[in-house]
Amino acid sequence: MTSEEMRNMHVVVETWTPKPAFFAATEEARNDLFTGIQEAMKQLAEIGFVTLGWGRLEPASHSASYEWFAVWQAPSREVADVFLNGVESSGWYTYFEQTNVVGELRPAEAVIAEHLALGAEAK
């Protein structure tokens, strides 16, 4: 992907672990939650929000302490915010302990240069 293609492209990474409320919820409540999420995913796709994938975290050095993750691609920060607001209004956080990461994709060289500048600023 070129830097021009990355311009304004945002990534959202969610990591989560079920709370006791999820396990205590009825099967119907859990099914309703995920049915709503699948419907929202279809609607978000219409505005350019792409589901890159979901998975279960595998043990790794310095890994997050959560059990599950999802990675999404948004055409702008505004669309990423629409998604995050939808997650909150869905009731998801009632059932899952979660951390979100949101950021604009940029070339590695630009981010490395920013890191090197941080080192120079500290002196």
Image (cartoon, rainbow, N blue to C red):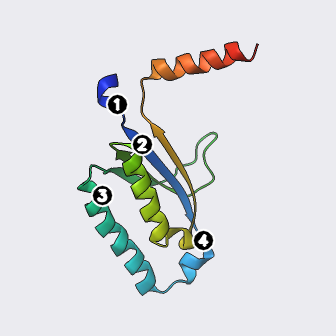
Estimate the spatial distance between the alpha carbons at disc 4 and disc 1, rounded to whole Å: 35 Å
Question: Mark 4 or mark 3, which is nearer the start of the sequence?
Answer: 4
- The residue positioned farthest toward the left in the image shown: 46
Q: Is residue 13 left or right of residue 65?
A: left
Q: Is the residue 34 above or below the residue 26 in the image?
A: above
Q: If you read the primary sequence from the N terminus, does the residue marked by circle 2 or circle 4 appear first? A: 2
- Cα distance between the residues tagged 2 and 4: 25 Å
The spot of residue 58 in percent (x, y) is 53, 49
Q: Amino acid at mark 1?
A: Met
Residue bearing the label numbered 4: 19
Label 2, label 3: how many angstroms apart (C-alpha)?
A: 14 Å
For the point 53% across and 54% down, the residue is 15
Q: Around disc 2, counting alpha carbons within 10 Å, would you say few (fewer than 14), some (14 to 19), or many (20 or more)?
A: many
Placement of the C terminus among the 4 image quadrants: top right
The answer to whether marks 2 and 1 mark residues whose Cβ atoms lie closer than 8 Å is no
Vertical placement of 5 versus 114: above or below?
below
Which label's residue is closer to the chain start, 2 or 3?
2
State left or right for residue 35 relative to residue 11.
Answer: left
Q: Quadrant of residue 45?
A: bottom left
Residue 11's disc is 2
Marker disc for residue 44 = 3
- Quarter of the figure with residue 17: bottom right
Front-most of residues 31 and 62: 31
- Residue hosting label 1: 6
Residue 108: x and y, percent? Answer: 46, 22
Could you say whether the residue bearing mark 2 is in a helix, strand or loop? Answer: strand
N-terminal label among 3 and 1? 1
Residue 91 shows in the view: yes
Q: In the image, which disc is placed on residue 25?
A: none
Which mark is nearer the camera, 4 or 1? Answer: 1
Q: CA distance from mark 2 to mark 1?
A: 10 Å
